[in-house]
Amino acid sequence: MTEFPEFIRVRQTFERPRVEDIEPEVAAQLARLNLASHIKPGESVAITAGSRGIANIARILRAAVGHLQSLGAEPFLVPAMGSHGGGTTAGQVDVLRHYGITEEFCGCPLRASMDTVVVCDAAQGFPIHFDRHAFAADHVLVCGRVKPHTRFVGQIESGLMKMMLIGLGKHEGAKIYHRAIHDYSFDEIVRDVAAKVMAKCKIVAGLAIVENAYDETARLEAVAPADFVPREIELLKLAKQWLPRLPFDAIDALLIDEMGKNISGCGIDTNVVGRKHNDNEAVAGELPRVRRIMARSLTPESKGNAIGIGIADLCTQRLVDTVDWAATAINGETSGHFGGVKRPLVYPNDRDMLRAGLATIGLTEPIDARAVWIRNTLDVADIECAASLLPEIESQSHLEVLTRARPLPFDAQGNLPKSLREMP
């Protein structure tokens, strides 16, 4: 008898709001704010460029640049990504280049530095840092994606407010804010620091991005500074509604082709795999409940930063071989997410990893395991599911079976195809 389940390809259908024409929508949104009443010809505008793998991000930034130039302004981009890129200027520029965010494509200068200005102290007593180039600009346009945070819970999670803290705070700011979060709530820190940044750092507008479950731009919204808090609260509700999800509440084994910083802030989106509050298992009331997570590779866009590797229980040696442990440590130290940088059990190939994972799920025999195989936590529209899940699949109207059950196609080295998309 085979030791592994057979798998079937399953397609999920999610709600799919989508911005079809990116550049005209950016221009229309920014035009709603009548920025010409705030920005005079010749004035400089710093635009934030972050480190997440946001759909259409280079086009969105280029369109924002074009709108500001139409007003006679002189926009420029600043990397806004805390400690990412190894916490170095060159590393952060390289991160942006991998996303297609360059001076040539966006049509404006890129001014990169890890230097900050301390603008004031927070109510809790720590210094508030802000990117030196952005602080020197006449105005700042904050551009960022609104989505559930991978670790913190509140009315405000990841978005424009966090970009003003962690992104524009650079490495020094990110370190102090994450330290403060150990003593105060994330919501308290983000509201207080963002309010002071608003008052002292010439924020002229925000450009919020919300994505759908297909990793597509679902909504673009220009936001006036006074509306950052109420609009971000509402946009976060939409982002949670449109979040990609796994179709089962209980999963014995989850195989993930790739993890990485371009996929999620901690490599594996904990909102998708059910480990937001505990790296090792779901807490009471959290779904899905996944017993074993197995990670196969690290994306090239991560530049070796494997923050979140500790969320996986098992991984392959080839993933470990691509890790820059120094860059990973910097991210772990800055965020205080030590559990996210602990090394899982490491195996020489996929077969050995799966064998070990399926042997540790309880009394269920491996061949009967509730196993799911995904490309990454951003891409769960087409997934591979163990044949044992077929009755549940057929009971859900948004799921469609695309193939017959097939055995896992291990090669001579004991590895599966690089991606489930290559599964025959």
Image (spheres, grey):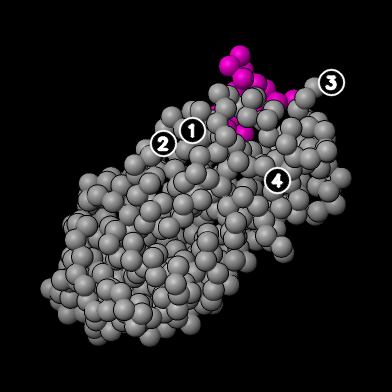
Which numbered disc, 1 or 4, marks the residue that appears first in the sequence? 4
Whether residue 323 is in magenta: the answer is no
**Secondary structure mainly formed by the magenta segment:** loop
Judge by depth and name the residue closer to the eye, 69 or 100: 100
Q: Where is 69 relative to 230, above or below?
A: above
Residue mark closest to the camera, 1 vs 4:
4
Q: Which residue is mark 2?
A: 323
Disc 1 residue type?
Leu
What is the CA distance from the residue labelled 1 to the residue labelled 3? 30 Å
Helix, strand or loop for disc 3: loop
Who's the residue at 27% across and 62% down the image? Answer: 172
Q: Which residue is mark 4?
A: 291
Kindly report the distance in space between the C-alpha atoms of the residues bearing marks 3 and 4: 24 Å
- Label placed on residue 135: none
At 83% from the left edge and 42% from the top edge, which residue is drawn? Answer: 390
Residue ID for mark 3: 1
Cα distance between the residues tagged 2 and 1: 7 Å
Q: 261 above or below 365? A: below
Q: Earlier in the sequence, mark 1 or mark 3?
A: 3
Q: Vertical placement of 395 versus 18: above or below?
A: above
Q: Earlier in the sequence, mark 3 or mark 4?
A: 3
The circle drawn on residue 319 is 1
In the picture, the quarter occupied by the C terminus is top right
